[in-house]
Image (tube, rainbow, N blue to C red):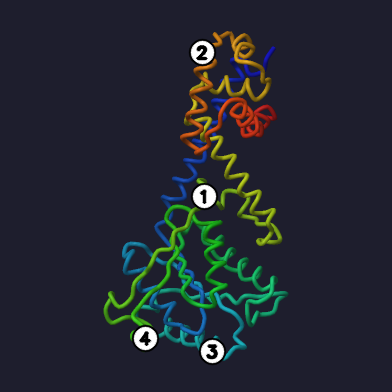
């Protein structure tokens, strides 16, 4: 008996997709509901005002959101200007009426337990990315939204802060770049006299996953976050998730039966029709519908035999997963 022709199997496939979708939707809603609080994360160079001005601007933009903690990421304090910037922030968060409401935490970037002075080697880049990644991840695991200010520190730090955000952000998280009049920045004032003296420019972040990333394998990343294999697997996972959503949300149950039959057993339209107890014309119409929907969803347009080969290549992993279950 053809597996895909079995009504119970077709129902099982439908229910599996539906339950997985419902479970994930419920989990995402749970996370979003609890994310009234936030963590503000900032990279630091020699200008401590970038941290405090960014915090002021974020809180001014989101007055109803409680920022539970401020985390500042920096390189070695053996650099006098770094140490001075950190000390300035410590004093300000202790003494200033506005800033003293926020718990302050510093994270020094380490390689083999030693603070890095610069970001020049692969190990230093890896340590920078991992420190920022783990800081964001910890906030996400506590169901907090994240405001990430990448204006401070070296450009390398800002670049990999955005990479970490790309990996871990979901709805409700924000990455920012702070801009201001040069004359005002030169005053080194830690807070503005007027809100319009500073502006937050949002940095667009396209998440890797439509599911909260900390619910996936990203909660426990590989030894190297710079591994090409790591990002290739992320892409494959995202692609497969998109295909699963396509199958469940775009295709009818009868179209899914035809798709599974093509992937599992192949054959001509007439052969598929015989196995599914349909007319060849019905199978042809349903295949054409699948092709149109696939083109609309993924922008791929192929003709003739290539279309059938595309379906087999793209959906074989999904069918294999279904059969394994």
CA gap between label 3 and label 1 equals 38 Å
3 or 1: mark nearer the eye? 3
Task: Pick the residue in front: 123 or 26.
Answer: 123
In the structure shown, which secondary structural element does the residue marked by tag 1 occupy?
loop
2 or 3: mark nearer the eye? 2
User: Which quadrant: the C terminus?
Assistant: top right
Which residue occupies the extreme bottom position in the image?
A: 80
CA gap between label 1 and label 4 equals 38 Å
Circle count: 4
Q: Earlier in the sequence, mark 2 or mark 1?
A: 1
Q: Which residue is mark 2?
A: 282
Residue at the image point whose x is 48% and y is 24% from the top: 289
CA gap between label 2 and label 1 equals 40 Å
Residue at the image point whose x is 63% and y is 76% from the top: 119
In the rendering, which numbered label is found on residue 189?
A: 4
Residue at the image point whose x is 67% and y is 20% from the top: 266
In the image, is residue 164 above or below residue 257?
Answer: below
Q: Earlier in the sequence, mark 2 or mark 3?
A: 3
2 or 1: mark nearer the eye? 2
In the rendering, which numbered label is found on residue 43?
A: none
221 left or right of 50 in image: right
Is the residue marked by circle 2 packed among few (<14), some (14-19), or many (20+) residues within 10 Å?
few
User: Which quadrant: the N terminus?
Assistant: top right
Q: Which residue is mark 1?
A: 212
Q: Which residue is mark 3?
A: 81
Is the residue marked by circle 4 packed among few (<14), some (14-19), or many (20+) residues within 10 Å?
some
Task: Pick the residue in front: 311 or 229.
Answer: 311
Q: Earlier in the sequence, mark 1 or mark 4?
A: 4
Q: Earlier in the sequence, mark 2 or mark 4?
A: 4
In the structure shown, which secondary structural element does the residue marked by tag 2 occupy?
helix
In the image, is residue 60 above or below residue 263?
Answer: below
């Amino acid at each position: 008996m053809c597996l895909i022709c079995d009504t119970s199997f077709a129902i099982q496939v439908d229910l599996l997709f539906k339950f997985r979708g419902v479970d994930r939707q419920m989990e995402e809603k749970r996370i979003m509901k609890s994310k009234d609080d936030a963590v503000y994360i900032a990279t630091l160079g020699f200008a401590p005002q970038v941290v405090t001005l960014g915090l002021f601007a974020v809180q001014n933009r989101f007055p109803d959101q409680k920022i539970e903690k401020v985390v500042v990421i920096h390189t070695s304090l053996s650099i006098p200007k770094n140490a001075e910037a950190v000390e300035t922030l410590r004093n300000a968060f202790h003494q200033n009426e506005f800033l003293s409401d926020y718990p302050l935490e510093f994270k020094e970037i380490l390689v083999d337990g030693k603070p890095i002075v610069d970001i020049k080697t692969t190990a230093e880049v890896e340590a920078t990315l991992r420190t920022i990644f783990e800081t964001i991840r910890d906030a996400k695991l506590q169901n907090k939204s994240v405001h990430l200010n990448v204006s401070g520190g070296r450009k390398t730090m800002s670049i990999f802060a955005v990479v970490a955000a790309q990996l871990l952000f979901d709805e409700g998280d924000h990455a920012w770049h702070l801009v201001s009049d040069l004359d005002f920045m030169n005053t080194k004032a830690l807070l503005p006299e007027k809100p319009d003296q500073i502006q937050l420019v949002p940095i667009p972040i396209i998440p890797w996953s439509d599911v909260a990333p900390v619910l996936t394998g990203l909660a426990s990343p590989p030894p190297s976050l710079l591994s090409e294999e790591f990002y290739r697997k992320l892409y494959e996972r995202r692609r497969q998730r998109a295909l699963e959503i396509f199958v469940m949300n775009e295709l009818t149950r009868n179209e899914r039966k035809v798709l599974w039959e093509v992937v599992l057993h192949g054959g001509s339209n007439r052969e598929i029709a015989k196995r599914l107890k349909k007319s060849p014309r019905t199978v042809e119409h349903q295949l054409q519908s699948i092709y149109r929907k696939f083109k609309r969803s993924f922008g791929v347009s192929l003709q003739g035999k290539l279309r059938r080969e595309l379906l087999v290549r793209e959906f074989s992993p999904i069918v294999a997963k279904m059969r394994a279950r």
